[in-house]
Image (tube, rainbow, N blue to C red):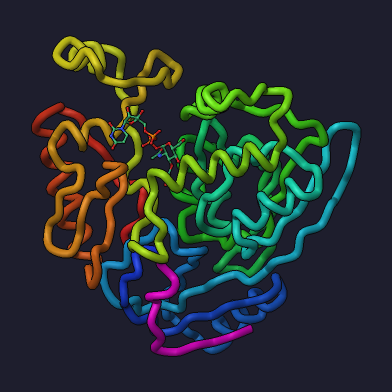
Amino acid sequence: MEILTNTSLAGYNTFGIDVQAARLVHYDSVEELQSLLWQREREGDTMPLLHIGGGSNLLFMGDVAATVLHSRIKDIVVTADEGDNVYVRVGAGVTWDAWVQYAIDSGWHGLENLSGIPGEVGAAAVQNIGAYGAEAKDAIIYVDTVNLQSAEVRHFAAGELDYGYRTSRFKTDLRGRYAVTYVHFRLSHSFKPQLGYGGLGSTLRERGIADYDLTPQALRQLVIEIRNSKLPDPAQLGNAGSFFKNPVVERDVYSRLAADYPTLPHYDAGEGRVKIPAAWLIEQAGWKGQSLGPAAVHDRQALVLVNRGGATGADIAALSRRITDDVRTRFGIDIEPEVNFI
Ligand code: EPU
């Protein structure tokens, strides 16, 4: 366990915003987390707790008067291997993309489309990361947690967690109440590439690569290549990937808009609803590549807000508000941040 006091969180958020945490604790095991929580109870420590992952979906609005918890639980264990399925328990502190690479190297499939996503395994299970037609929830079967109040271990079946587009109960009624310690995945020994989304299939065809020639590693590389062509590297330009969620609207809202904007891209979201790319709305509203002080809209992906250097959380939030107001005025649609404001 490592405990730091009055320490900068600049290295713990991909926006690179420099705020101070009263205390930052990296713990290495479930037992360490529990002993920390028991000690807190014994000492009557009332400082709030804030659990972070890789910080790739956070916007710090100011100094954090809390004990910031961060997991360094990093073991990966096969718990069962039956027929085509392998069941693997992964520590919440494992870097997500290192896990994807490990799975591919081990001959376990299902995560290839989620290659290159920043962040850690625990947070992936909280917010149900997704890309190229796949979501973490497709592979998650259980989530192990520790109750931050009682220090008791609790196992959730994925079915109890109300997984949806970039959400789970850890973001709603269970928010702030549990630390994810392990995530259990069900992967497959056979490789069945999903190429129907985000230009994967069309890029392969352009390159003359037949589906049956595609290796898992090549699919991973292709996903990373497409991501890198649109998304800035946080090490070079602070950002948190998509800043907003894509809005899901009723079909009549979509039809009204489509009458005015025949090129409006859209996807079926089930239950008679339609998902519209927020990037398109933001670009049409004229914000792509625009700046407001040190905060800017990325010039290759309008859904990504960037820190051009020295931005505060308030700078990014001000740009976010201007964009949401503008999109509401022009299109009558509310877009919501995917990023958590802290
Ligand atoms: N578009 C624009 N202008 C732009 C960019 C995109 O008009 O500047 C339109 C285009 O019509 C494009 C459509 O938006 O076809 C969708 O764009 P893209 O495929 O880049 O995906 P996205 O909807 O912007 C979502 C996820 C990403 C994920 C990609 C790929 C959300 C909030 N974002 O972005 O996830 O990588 O799909 O599957 O759902 C993240 O959550 O941080 C993230 C990066």
- Check the picture and name the quadrant holding the N terminus: bottom right
Q: Residue furthest front?
A: 208
Which residue is at 39% across, 48% downward? 231
Q: Quadrant of residue 342?
A: bottom left
**Ligand 1 position by quadrant:** top left
Q: Is residue 274 magenta?
A: no
Residue 222 at what x, y percent from top left? 56, 39
Relative to residue 165, is residue 293 drawn left or right? left
Q: Quadrant of residue 295?
A: bottom left
- The magenta region covers 1-13
Residue 178 at what x, y percent from top left? 56, 60
Which residue is at 46% across, 78% downward? 67
Please state the total of marks drawn on the protein image.
Answer: 0
Q: Quadrant of residue 329?
A: top left
Residue 34 at what x, y percent from top left? 66, 75
Q: Observer-nearest residue: 226 or 75?
A: 226
